[in-house]
Image: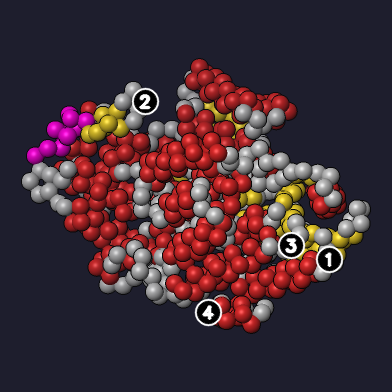
Amino acid sequence: MTQTMTAEYDRLSGLGEDEVVTHSFVRDVALASGKTLALITLDNGRDHTRPNTLGPATLFELASVLDTLRERADAGEIHGVALTGKPYILAAGADLSKVQEIPDLETGRQMARLGHATFGRLSELGVPSFAFINGLALGGGLEIALNADYRTIDSSAPAVGQPEVFIGLIPGWGGAWLLPNLIGIENALKVVVENPLKNNRLLRGPQALELGIADAMFPPATFLEDSIAWADRVLSGELKVKRPNEPGMVERTVKWDAAISIARKTLESRIGTVAKAPYKALELMKAAKNSDKATGFAAEDEALAELIASDQFRASIYAFNLVQKRAKRPAGAPDPAIARPVTKIGIIGAGLMASQFALLFLRRMQVPVVITDLDQQRVDQAVERIKGELAELREKGKINPDELNRLEALITGTVNKADFADCDWVIEAVFEELEVKQAVFEQVEPFLSPEAVLATNTSSLSVEQIGTKLKHPERLVGFHFFNPVAVMPLIEVVKTPQTDDAVLATAMAAAKSLKKTAVITADTPGFVVNRLLAKLLGEAMHAVDTGTPFETVDEAVAPFGLPMTAFELLELVGLKVGAHVLDTHHAAFPDRFYESENLHRLAEHGRIFERDSKGRIKGIDKAARKIVSGGKSAMSADELRRRIEDGLADEIKRMVDDKVVSAVEDIDLCLLLGAGWPFQMGGATPYLDRVGASQRAFGDTFHHPPIRGVAGDDNAD
């Protein structure tokens, strides 16, 4: 690191003291053409479980290496520079542990500028530069490659992308300017905004090539050799690289602004306007149409510094750690070694939910699945429905013909409970009525082996009460999915006082096999997600019942950043179901949960909203508005928001004190994965601490210290 860089980035020197440094190792490669390629390999000296990351010390070292290579290029010693990573990994992006330590806005600005200054050297070497993307390349890891002149990619690369907006940041080391100018605005919007907000979807090697992120792709066995040979052809002039997705004049003058406008409207409809990062990314990408690289990079510096300093970034990192770390080590889980094997699954019920279960179990666990119901016609219809879903997956290319045949052979239907005798796992998907669930388990239990596990998907009933007619209630566990089953990542695993540890371990292993995140909860009304949603929905109905307009309720809840309004959620789950949920919670906690007769009337009416022919909301239905009319105690949006915040803080504190879950972090994890609570909020508790609701409700905070932005942040929420 030069003295000039030391002075320019003086605030960063302390951040690198305990950094796991990703070193830049250089070797010369003699090319077939007689030229010399300097090859940089990024390697932090750890195995593949610790990906290369990019902290201040790493960036200083890489900058120094590139300065040396520029001198060698000027002297004619090398004719090109290439950069790759240790096996299977280029880099996983910025070292978030270091970014979290940034104490003020100016330090954040220096971190942004250092990334640009370092990576920018790849295009200022005086000789062509290449990035050989040999595996994982995320965030800053991909931006290293984007700053090079040319890129190759390993066909087996599993994860390539710009996931920054997922954690409250933007691609701030070149991605917001370079990517749209490389692959076109629509493709760039997909990578920078759309994919991260779809549960952090990433690209594989062939997709990156198709979009134009890479110029060439080679198989893993010969990737480095092929990439070097390809670079030699470029250096010798034998190969001219063409980039069909690079934007031309028509795209810049006609399509660019339209694509940004459409993306903005889509964002507003899907996530509201609370989250800062996606909209900041749109601003930067819109400006990239006409600005030069220096201007684009300077804009990224300011945007990244602002976001690093924000409460939303701190909350996002908290949420990210919950999903990446805590979710993989479930609190209160028994030893996985005592889990029982699941070699055949039985499903009681043949409706739509049962079909979703069957399809998921088939695809993820690939074991025989048998469905039963009251009559053969229902069973046959369910089996045909499932086979139809499998055929659609085949048409979409998600499974191949052999997989289709194998999975179709694994699904059967029966009305004979004796066919469940060899099932290791039996789950019910019948009506949400206690007596019905008790009856189906009582009927099937005599046919099961002593080791078979029974699972209920109840969303609000007591699991313990469901098991009261079982001879062995210790074999029963709650296994609460969220709709749509294939998409929502959370399962609430409900432990009753009788649930055996081996049964609980089997449920946790099953959730893992299904690629779901499981959180263990106590057997209490609503468990976690539905209890807190019932609190929110109850307050929304209380407000309109007492005279507050629907629109004011929406305004009050908007700062939570939820994916839909309270009334949209009620229509989604079904007004009758919503009324049942509120009734259940009011019966359990009458002093804290509201019971709405008007919600039952709305359920009889059948809707809250007027919609157009495509199902889009036009406004509040006139009859629905009349049903709730008559209240004389309207609240303002601010008054209602405070009431809801304080109610949620109080309820969460009670849940923690009553050990519904092991810790408050598990409640936030459930809200993130089961209720769509925004990552930028970190779940509920960081937000409730920040707005003072925790202090108002119980005189303390959930987190010590509260999760807030860094010093010098004038833009924090």
Instruction: Work out whether mark 4 precedes mark 3 in sequence or the reverse, and give the earlier one.
Output: 4
The residue where tag 1 is placed is 76
User: Which is more foreground, mark 4 or mark 3?
Assistant: 3
Q: Is there CB contact under 8 Å for labels 2 and 4?
A: no
Residue 582, by quadrant, is top left
- The residue carrying mark 3 is 126
- Residue 595's spot in the image, x, y percent? 21, 44
- Mark 1 and mark 4 lie on one chain; the one further toward the N terminus is 4
**Three-letter residue code for mark 4:** Arg
Q: State the quadrant of the N terminus.
A: bottom right
**Residue 475, relative to residue 346: is it above or below?**
below
Q: Separation of disc 4 and disc 3 at Cα?
A: 30 Å
Q: Tag count in the figure?
A: 4
Per the rendered image, the range of residues in magenta is 621-630
Looking at the rendered structure, the kind of residue marked 2 is Lys
Q: CA distance from mark 1 to mark 4?
A: 36 Å
Mark 4 crowd level (few <14, some 14–19, many ≥20, 10 Å Cα): some
Residue wearing tag 2: 614
Q: Amino acid at mark 3?
A: Gly
Q: Determine the CA span between mark 1 and mark 2.
A: 65 Å
Q: Is residue 627 magenta?
A: yes
Callout 1, which amino acid? Gly
Task: Report if residue 221 is visible in the image.
Answer: no
Q: With 79 as the anchor, is 380 left or right in this view? A: left
**Which residue is tagged 4?**
11
